[in-house]
Amino acid sequence: MKTGRLNLRISEKRLAKLKTYADNKEKTITQLVEDWIDRLPHPAKIDDFSTTPLPNQSDD
């Protein structure tokens, strides 16, 4: 499998939360992100969601 790289800027608080969650699930952050991506709708269905606004989220 050919791989790519993703760089992401998030707060230290969110990074710590993500690391803790990954440790508790015995997964890597990469595995968590891949699992999330795999749950996204198929690209042909993305247009169905294009007008749905994202929920407001606090800086957890």
Image (cartoon, rainbow, N blue to C red):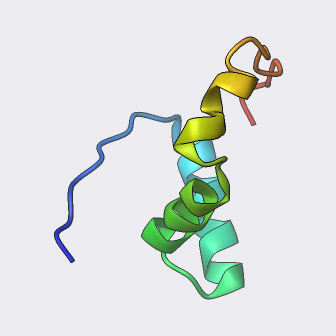
Residue situated furthest front in the rendering? 44
Closest to the observer, 55 or 9: 55
Q: Where's residue 31, x and y in %?
A: 50, 73
Asked if 57 appears above or below 10 in the picture, the reply is above
Quarter occupied by the C terminus: top right
Q: Position of residue 56 (x, y in %)?
A: 81, 18
Residue in front for this viewpoint, 16 or 44: 44
Q: Which residue is painted at 76% across and 20% down in the image?
A: 54
The image quarter containing residue 55 is top right
Q: Position of residue 16 (x, y in %)?
A: 58, 56
- Residue occupying image coordinates x 52% and y 59%: 33
Quick check: 30 left or right of 51? left
Q: How many callouts does the rendering have?
A: 0
20 on left or right of 6: right
Q: Residue furthest bottom?
A: 26
Q: Against 49, is 43 above or below?
A: below
Which residue is nearer to you in this view: 21 or 5?
5
Residue situated furthest left in the rendering: 2
The quadrant of the picture occupied by the N terminus is bottom left
- In the rendered image, the vertical position of residue 56 relative to residue 9, given as above or below: above
Quadrant of the rendered image containing residue 50: top right
Left or right, 15 with respect to 60, comes to left
Residue occupying image coordinates x 74% and y 11%: 51
Q: Position of residue 25 (x, y in %)?
A: 69, 82
Image quadrant in which you'd find residue 26: bottom right
Residue at image coords 20%, 56%: 4
